[in-house]
Amino acid sequence: MAVNFRKTAFTGVAAKLEQCPPPDLPEIVMSGRSNVGKSSLINALADNKKLAKISQTPGKTRLVIYFNVDNQLLLTDLPGYGYAKVSQIEKERYSKLADQYLHSDRPICMVLHLLDIRHKPNQHDIQMIAWLVESGLPWQIVLTKVDKLSRTQAQKQRQEIAKFLGIDDLSHLNLVSTTKKQGLTELRELIAARVGESVADM
């Protein structure tokens, strides 16, 4: 059955693993810095600007947030990291939650790690990519905010980031702009393929 991304609904949050929903659906997990644009990407994939709340204060989302996509998969938004104005104790708490989640027995079928294309990956990003490579989980890097650069600049940054992370295959890095709707079709197709389906017409 083709996945209809417009049939995406918020289904709940979890502050600890015991509060997670039953592992009945395959999960596409999103990770990345607190201001990298995960909520904007979820809204863009679902073609619904009001679906995921976009905070004006980076670092505010400190829970695992779930979105059901057409009863065929879950989009799982992990707590963002790296926002300086959050206390160290608070940082450690939701960093631990994200770490526990990735090491749990949840039915994770792919991890999308988001990077702002304008910035070099930080230490958290480097550690995350290294862990993904070692984990054996399918993963993809999503380079967000590409509309902030020219096409030539974006391609150059893509190559630079891949080189910086030691990634030889550029197909592991998707270019996405939620404002210009660039790269969304390809990302929907990638997500649907991970659960063995195609994408319904939008």
Image (cartoon, rainbow, N blue to C red):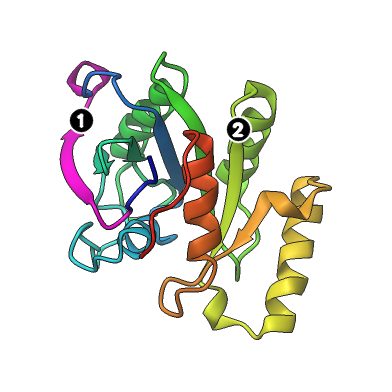
Residue 47's spot in the image, x, y percent? 30, 66
Q: Residue 14 carries which label?
A: 1
Residue at (52, 73) in percent of width and height: 182
Using the image, determine if residue 193 lies above or below residue 44: above
Q: Quadrant of residue 51?
A: bottom left
Is residue 115 in view? no
Q: Does the magenta-highlighted stretch encompass residue 8?
A: yes
Front residue (pair 188, 60)? 188
Q: In which quarter of the image is the N terminus?
A: top left
Q: Residue 138 carries which label?
A: 2
Residue at (52, 52) in percent of width and height: 189
Q: What stretch is highlighted in magenta?
A: 5-19
The mark total stands at 2
Is residue 100 in view? yes
Q: Residues within 10 Å of mark 1 (few under 14, many from 20)?
A: some
Residue at (48, 64) in percent of width and height: 184
Q: Quadrant of residue 132?
A: top right
Q: Is residue 166 left or right of residue 15?
A: right
Task: Pick out the residue farthest to the bottom.
Answer: 150
Q: Quadrant of the C terminus?
A: bottom left
Q: In this view, does 105 lie to the left or right of 149?
A: left
Q: How far apart are marks 2 and 1 (CA)?
A: 23 Å
The secondary structure type at the circle numbered 1 is: strand
Q: Which amino acid does label 1 sit on?
A: Ala
Residue 16's spot in the image, x, y percent? 23, 23
The secondary structure type at the circle numbered 2 is: loop
Q: Is residue 192 left or right of residue 1?
A: right
Sequence-wise first label, 2 or 1: 1
Q: In which quarter of the image is residue 158?
A: bottom right
